[in-house]
Image (cartoon, rainbow, N blue to C red):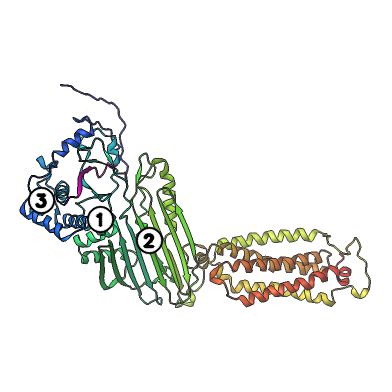
Amino acid sequence: MKEYLWEFRNLPVVIEEDSLPSWYDPYPSVQLSEFASWKEVAEWAARLYPRPPQLAPELVEKINTWQHSLLQPEARLASVLQFIQDEIRYLGIEFGPNSHQPSDPSMVFARRFGDCKDKAYLFCTILQQLNIDASVALVHTEYRATIADWLPSPYAFDHVVVQVRLNGKTYWLDPTKSHQGGPVGDRYFPDYGRCLLIRPETTELTVIPQQKSGWPITTVQEMFMVHGRKEPAEMTVHTRAEGLDADRLRAAFADVGRNELEKRYLNFYARDYPKIKTTKPLEVLDYSEQNVFETFEHYQIQEFWTLSDDRRKYECEFYPRIVLDLLDEPTTTLRSMPLAIGYPRHEILQTEVILPELWPVTGNTNHVSTTAAQLTTKRTIQTNVFWLKYEYQSLTNCILVTNVPAYLKNINQMKDLLGYSLTWANEELPASAGTTHLNWTIVSLAGIYMILLTAGYAILYRIRRLPFPIGYGEEPPVLDQRHVGLGGWLVLPAFGLFARPIRVLFFMGSNWTVYSSESWHSLTDPSGGAYHGLWAPLLIFELLVNLTLMSFPVFLIILFFQRRRTFPPLFVMYLLFAVITITLDHFELQMIPAVVGQNSSSVSRELAQSYIACAIWIPYMLVSKRVKATFVR
């Protein structure tokens, strides 16, 4: 007898983190085996799966039926697989010899139940009787490909699947799966990575190529018919599941039942819409030959528009919880162990919203991608209809420790892209409650800017002369006393300077609510109903320009009546500033789809007036004898 002793002292505690890959074991372990090679293990297993010397008459009769009714081997394979998966119930009595030794195929066929060993053994036996090459394969559903690092042992496996070779093709099939649909070659098979193939020539573990067939993809199409503030909205949901997702849905409806699933679906949406109710029974379509499973849900949502706490506006939100549920974050974020994520997953959510009127919704597209997952979001609009599209796809099943921080950062970026809300002013709000809240940030910005402008005007006031071309020397000549004084054509610029502050002040007063806290949030916050990325810089730009156009003429009027020689060049600067800023403002507005075409005539008129003013008064200030003779102080 040999005794092996491992002794360790003062070991650090192993704290197991959450969301670990199934193949990762944080605890130290020791493996012992009586087998020197995988070949010995395969030889041991082969004795458990011999060709039965004889089969029960009932099983022979069933095999003969397949042989005579189905001429193509592929059709026989598909029919036998469907029978084993759906007609032989999965039930394991795994103790004693049955922990590893399968039951006799005739017994399994007669009693109509068995575990993975039993079903795989029966499946291979039937296929071999039909002259189809089929072999049992041992796999581990959790440790998967990492068993290649283990010692050869029967304990390296916990599941039995089947390899089928037919007409030059190799199929990896799992007879224990139920409710699978589609052609045999398109059925989903997990990425087990390695297996022990029970064949005479087996000497090592066999690599199982990752199967690309039958991968899951689910497309959910939501349609909201939105009405008035106090009217209910209608919602329909069309779900189309393909591949593995179709298998899962088909199995859920078979095992759980339609009524229970209908209740679950309703409660799923009730998290966002508490007053939701079904208007039609859940519809189900199963295209098993193509492995497509579809459901149709019909709802009515009372109180779809919810009144805000201050009763100033109604709000509604479209939030993709289907996508959010895929963006799981682990409890332990500062990790020393790898992180597992759901894989493979491919979910597409398309939300169509039909609104009762035109709405200032803006379109955009965003994409966030990592080595582990990617999300694309897109928002488009056409008249009173807009669409939200989210497409999520996982790219691997785990994330190494070094990549976890970047992955979690990208997950947060993905979550920031989810959801869209609309707001509708409460027109029934009493007049006493109709006051808007001041945006003190904007008020502070305006105050600071006015202080800076005043300081700038004070500096300019102290300047006696500015560089100015054409005829301005130390002492401008006076050609005629009739040209001296604030008269003639100079009266018109003076009227314009008096009128401009009044016009700007009136404009700012009639539009000041756009800078209120409510409007500012709606226009500049991504969750606002009229959000666009250009609104914030545009509104700040317009505020500063209007403050300048309101105060600059006042300063020029003072210089005008004092007949300061700095008036002409500063007046030219004022005209150029006005025409440049108005032009820039016009082009920035054209980049915001919600306001394209609005007030286009008034904007065009203001642009035309500014250009005409420059064309007339800039040359006048440069060449006028009255200007040269009057502004000499």
Q: CA distance from mark 1 to mark 2?
A: 26 Å
- Look at the image and tell me whether residue 551 can be seen: no
Left or right: where does residue 423 sit relative to residue 19? Answer: right
Give the residue type at disc 2.
Ile
Where 346 sits versus 500, above or below? above
Pinpoint residue 188: horizontal percent, then vertical percent: 28, 53
Image-quadrant location for residue 135? top left
Q: CA distance from mark 1 to mark 3?
A: 23 Å
Segment colored magenta: 130-144
- Look at the image and tell me whether residue 315 can be seen: yes
Q: CA distance from mark 2 to mark 3?
A: 42 Å
Residue 311 among those drawn in magenta? no
Pinpoint residue 31: horizontal percent, then vertical percent: 23, 31
Give the residue type at disc 1.
Val
Q: Secondary structure at mark 2?
A: strand
Give the mark, 1 or 3, whose residue is nearer the N terminus. 3
Residue 139 among those drawn in magenta? yes
Image-quadrant location for residue 350? bottom left
Pinpoint residue 482: horizontal percent, then vertical percent: 91, 76
Which numbered mark, 1 or 3, is in the foreground of this view? 1
Say which residue label 1 marks.
184
Give the mark, 2 or 3, whose residue is nearer the N terminus. 3
Say which residue label 3 marks.
108
Q: Residues within 10 Å of mark 2 (few under 14, many from 20)?
A: many
Which numbered mark, 1 or 2, is in the foreground of this view? 1
* Residue drawn at (30%, 29%) of the image: 11
Say which residue label 2 marks.
348
